[in-house]
Image (cartoon, rainbow, N blue to C red):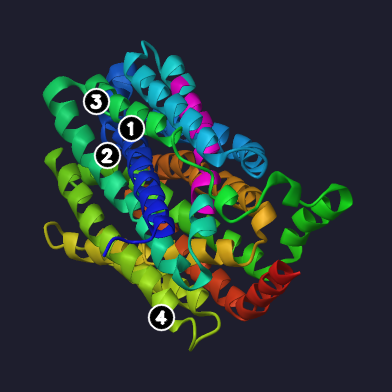
Amino acid sequence: MEPPASTRTARTALALLLSINLFNYIDRYVLAAVEPEIAKTFFGIHAKDPSNLAKMGFLATAFLVSYMLLVPLFGWLADRMSRWVLVGISVAIWSLATGGSGLAASFGLLLIMRCFVGIGEAGYGPSAPTIISDLFPVAKRGAVLAWFYAAIPVGSALGYVLGSKVGVAFGWRMAFFVVTPPGLILAALSLFMADPRGRVKRARTDLPKGDSRWREYLALARNRSYVFDTLGMTAMTFALGGMSFWMPQYLDSRGLPPQARELFGEITAATGLAATLLGGMAGDKLRGKLPGSYFLVSAAGMFLACPFIIAMLYISFPWAWVPMTIAIFFLFFNTGPTNAILANVTLPAVRATAFGLNILILHLFGDAAAPPFLGAFAGRFGWSAAFGVVAAATVLAGLLWLLGAAHLQKDMQLVEAAALL
């Protein structure tokens, strides 16, 4: 039997957004995959000096700074205009900037291109999960958002694999060129999609006005589930962002060949995909039995990841791949539940703004800070010490999510009650 039109619409939207998110992370991690080659191009024999390692880290930070500073503005716009139009324009901007990264003749120009990638992704970041939240009910959001965010490990892994293969065969510039056309195609497809708020009879006139609107924005600071979720995601993002950006350098420091980056990408794709989907399903399944299930599932993943990150540092390869694989699995276990929390404890009229503020905070103090900090730290104390900081960040994330678990049921009930008014 053919599914109802609304179901087809929801599935089509999810498939398109998942595809865009896939290339979102491919574009991000192509840079990480070819970072050693870029460093050699611009810094030559001094590529591994501590100061130059910190500069390379700023390539990730430049993208994230422009991304996080503009994402609250785009979240505000997403609550007031067609989110699909905003997505289409944004994807086109970041895809063109990715191609421009391959054309950069100097480190400064490459830095500017990464800033434009961040601008494009800022328009997409708060809109996509909000569209999904409008299309799917609360009971299914954890699993559905897990499918959407499954693009993170798979896209990151493909970025590593594609960047490594193309970079070795044709040079690091070509790695940026090959991912540009698919992004432009996806941008064009987005312009043909209808905003779901029209289907569910939510219009811009439903937005709170004046003082009422600002009260709803300020209420986010008093929403304990939102606050603890955002703080935990920040610590997690610091750990995952720092680990993923510097993994090629870490593998090089352990004496492994460039092909090891491809293996790391394949491991990330397989384990990250499985963990993201299983985490989302676990949060939904336990929701009726454990009121704070989304927080508890996320915290458990962080606590379990920590010892395996530490074990990875002290076990020789190839055996070190085993704890690394387990650590990656648990690092991604929280993805669906933590984003479901954001959707479930925020009012629909300000949800895109809430996602935008969350993105600003977690990147400002998370993966924008991690690459230059860990690069400089590793230059002074070694990569084992730097990845020890990553392990500590996972414990902090788990503790913050445990604190949030006691508040989740109450905060969700408040949103459900407000929606009935």
Q: State the quadrant of the N terminus.
A: bottom left
Q: What element carries label 2?
A: helix
Marks 2 and 3 close (CB-CB < 8 Å): no
Residue interval drawn in magenta: 113-130
On residue 178, which mark appears? 3
Query: Residue at the front extreme?
Result: 1
Gap in Å between the C-alphas at discs 1 and 4? 37 Å
Residue that label 2 marks: 159
Q: Residue at x 41, y 20 (%)?
A: 110
Task: Identify the residue under disc 1.
Answer: 31
Q: Which amino acid does label 4 sit on?
A: Lys
Above or below residue 68? Residue 283 is below
Q: Which of marks 2 and 3 is in front?
A: 3
| Alpha-carbon span between mark 2 and mark 3 | 11 Å
Label pair 4/2, CB-CB below 8 angstroms: no
The answer to whether the residue labelled 1 contacts the one labelled 2, judged by CB atoms less than 8 Å apart, is: yes
Q: Position of residue 237 (x, y in %)?
A: 47, 53
**Mark 1: amino acid:** Leu
Instruction: State the residue position of label 4.
Output: 285
Location of residue 302 (image quadrant): bottom left
In this orientation, which residue lies closer to the viewer: 8 or 275? 8
The residue shown at (62%, 80%) is: 409
